[in-house]
Image (cartoon, rainbow, N blue to C red):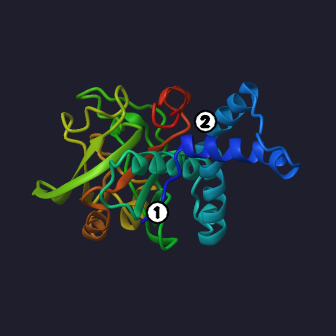
Amino acid sequence: MRRIISPVKTACFITLLVSFPFLINGKTTPVVTSQLVLSALSSASLSSSAAALAEATMLNDSLHLDTKGLNIKALEYALKGFNYLQQKGMLYNKDILSICDYSQSSKNKRLYVIDIVNKKLMLNTYVAHGKNSGTEYANSFSNNPNSLKSSLGFYVTRSTYFGGHGLSLKIDGLEKGFNDKANTRNIVVHGSDYVGNNFVRSNNFCGRSYGCPAVPSQESPMVINTIKNGSCLFIYHPTQKYLKQSRILNS
């Protein structure tokens, strides 16, 4: 299990470091000014972003995810949210982080399933975006029913079921105003023949869904069984409205 250091503990640690020079210079009662404490707390508020950036850099160096097309900012944001959800106790499957990088063309393998604990890229495959989000590239997103668009942000995977697309996976959107209507919209992970190598060879880019992150039919059981039951799924695009207003990313 990964240990998450809270911002409060970080602030206390920073305060101790600030105080420590007074101790080693022989002061029996270290003096820590309110300004120093405020500085420590400010540093703590930034610590989650700094930690995510450092972790993203190390993970990328280890797995060479950028050479596989993953946007390093997508990885950084994903790790920040992943750590936040862990700290809040919202993840049951705590080893797995999945990233849909919708900044890429749909003809690219832009779904990344990462084992964070063992630092392993478990799966890298195609994923569709919503029909009304764009053609080759997704550039428009919505949380509204019947929009036929993808929804950005963080999700927690839930249970599987068998439906019209065979084995499918329910996902809960965690971000109000961005993806919290996922269940109402029946947004799920499922397999489809309009996603994958064969379709791309004939059509130049993947087909589109009604808003679901659909994956290749032949790979869907492996994807779904790897990420089901409480793992983190992050759907990324550099849309400024989302990046500035996400409560998870700006926590």
Q: Position of residue 111 (x, y in %)?
A: 44, 58
- Where disc 2 sits, the SS reads helix
**Left of 230 or right of it: where is 159?**
left
Compared to 245, does 86 lie above or below? below
- Whether residue 101 is visible here, answered yes or no, is no
Mark 1 element type = loop
Please state which amino acid type lies under the numbered disc 2.
Answer: Ser
The mark found on residue 161 in the picture is none
- At x 75% / y 28%, what residue is drawn? 33
- Disc 1 residue type (three-letter): Arg
- Left or right: where does residue 56 sit relative to residue 249? right
Residue behind mark 2: 45
**Residue 1 occupies which quadrant of the picture?**
bottom left
Density class for disc 2 (Cα within 10 Å; few <14, some 14-19, many ≥20) is some
* Residue 71 visible in the current orientation: yes
**In this figure, what is the number of numbered marks?**
2
Q: Residue at x 26, y 60 (%)?
A: 228
Give the alpha-carbon distance from disc 1 to disc 2, as whole Å.
Answer: 20 Å
Q: Position of residue 2 (x, y in %)?
A: 46, 63
Residue located beneath label 1 in the image: 2
**Viewer-proximal residue among 141 and 134:** 141
